[in-house]
Amino acid sequence: MTLRRLTTLMRLGLSSWPEVLKSTSVSQAHKPVDTFLPTKRPYSQELRIYTRTGDKGVTALFSGERLPKDTHFFNALGTTDELSSHLGLAKEYAQERKHEYADQLERIQCILQDISSLLATPRNQKYTGDPEREKRILEKLSFNPRHITELEGWIDEYTSRLPPLTNFILPGGGRVSASLHVARTVCRRAERTVVPLVSEGLVDQQVLVYINRLSDYLFTVARFATLLDGKKETVYIRPQSQQKPKLDKTQQFSENQKIV
């Protein structure tokens, strides 16, 4: 295994890391880290960010299979990466306001990194002629449902501290909340890109469940951010042409909701 391959897998957080180490030679595995670092140049050729191997619109999965970059695998990988980036922005905003859930957003980013490893390693690949080893690898490619339970616990906690949701609300409610709503919509798109992979048995079903539940979490925590910042939720009212919107007398509004 080349160092470039090894560092790429480390960066992506491959869940089957022990299997990767097994395929690494003893001399590589026990070589001091300093020997991999350049002595005179700021970067060595082995650590280049660019490889030129994807210049023709194809790239490789962890299995080594090279596919066009517009296939289902890379649509899912790219959208998951986009989601993590939006979460990183929302986390920065949340930390500035000292919101208590900011660390949860970082944890979710780490879990999405693990999900990316699963997306890039199809479950139908045959790695060896050893059935027992293949079984162990398949177990490594499974997503732990405890992460889903964790999300549900957070959702229940914040929901208990929020006013009842009796109306449709529009994305907004302050900068932090708005950024979380953007992340929520990207999460929904990520879910749609994962569906074909799960349907074909290439990715663990629990990955889809997690991403689905994550969008619910982001909606809930976006509302919670509005509450923490002392902002008001904007309630949807059906627009009336050239007239002031008429309020539905049956609708109930909470103190932190406003009508536009």
Image (spheres, rainbow, N blue to C red):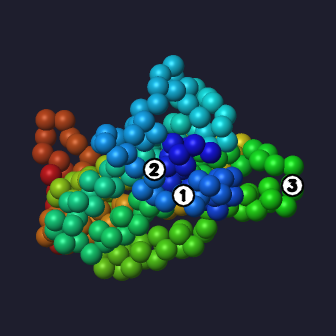
Sequence-wise first label, 1 or 3: 1
Residue 161 in the image: x percent, y percent?
A: 31, 79
Q: Secondary structure at mark 2?
A: helix
| Left or right of 48 in this view: 133 | right
Q: Which residue: 87% across, 49% down?
A: 129
Q: Which residue: 79% across, 45% down?
A: 126
For the residues marked 2 and 3, what is the alpha-carbon distance in whole angstroms? Answer: 33 Å
For the residues marked 1 and 2, what is the alpha-carbon distance in whole angstroms? Answer: 8 Å
Q: Secondary structure at mark 3?
A: loop
Amino acid on which the number 2 mark rests in the picture: Phe
Q: Secondary structure at mark 1?
A: loop
- CB atoms of marks 1 and 2 within 8 Å: yes
Sequence-wise first label, 1 or 2: 1
Location of mark 2 (residue): 36
Quadrant, the N terminus: top right
Q: Which residue: 37% across, 61% down?
A: 218
Amino acid on which the number 1 mark rests in the picture: Lys
Location of mark 3 (residue): 130
Q: Which mark is residue 31?
A: 1
- CB atoms of marks 1 and 3 within 8 Å: no
Residue 75 in the image: x percent, y percent?
A: 51, 36
